[in-house]
Image (cartoon, helix red, strand yellow):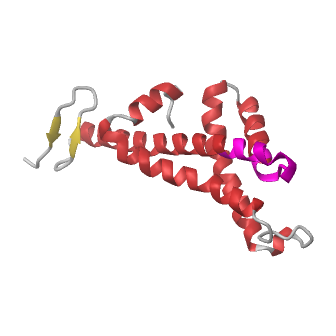
Amino acid sequence: MNTLSIVDSIRKATLKTSRLGLFIGAVVGAVVPVGVFAITHTSGVLDLSRPLWLQAPAFLVAGGLAFSAHSVVTWTERLFRNRLKAACWTLLVEGLMTFAPAQLAWLSWVCLALLVAVNAVSNGCAVALDRAEGHAQRRARGVPGSAFKDETSGVHETRRAA
């Protein structure tokens, strides 16, 4: 688990050697709240007059909310330094994005933007930092044939079998 501060995570994840991981994680993270928003705010996709457990899109929404909520709670817990506050903020923002009425459409859009940003940064940093940690572990074990760039010195090394 990442114990760096949010700012340090972003700094490390945006290093030149981590940018591909950051991009991949950001795309994966951002797609989820956009998909939930599209399903819940497109008329005809969910029929609220029928039981939700009989509708496949409801399961997509539930899965997307669970995925996003985990990322957002993890990220905001580091931000707020308080698990309850992080969970409440996540519930509020996820709920407003998903269930705000048409009269408050602007609020849904604001919450969508927040969730896209948090999910993109959270997942992007996780992928990028996981990659960096994997390189450090392989380096510590002296794994033959592992190429990496030492992020602190900028020196590129390739370990070869002796």
* SS majority, magenta: helix
Q: Residue at x 35, y 41 (%)?
A: 18
Query: Residue at 79% across / 67% down in the picture?
Result: 43
At a point 54% along the width and 40% down the height, the residue shown is 122
| Viewer-side residue, 130 vs 38 | 38
Please say whether residue 83 is one of the residues in the magenta stretch. no
Q: Indicate whether 65 appears above or below 115.
A: below
Question: Depth check: 46 or 156 in front?
Answer: 46
- Tell me the quarter of the picture where residue 82 sits: top right
Using the rendered view, name the quadrant where residue 107 is placed. top right
Is 110 a magenta residue? yes
Q: Is residue 91 above or below residue 37?
A: above
134 displayed left or right of 33: left
Q: Picture coordinates of residue 94 (x, y %)?
A: 74, 46
Residue 32 screen position, x and y as percent: 61, 55
Q: Give the farthest residue toward the right.
A: 49
Decide if residue 46 is in sight here.
yes
- Which residue is located at x 79 percent, y 48 percent? 105
49, 17: nearer the viewer: 49
Q: Position of residue 44 (x, y in %)?
A: 80, 71
Position of 65 compared to 137: left or right? Answer: right
Q: Nearer the viewer, residue 8 or 109?
A: 109
Image side of residue 150 versus residue 26, left or right: left
Q: Which residues are magenta?
A: 96-112
Q: Position of residue 87 (x, y in %)?
A: 74, 37
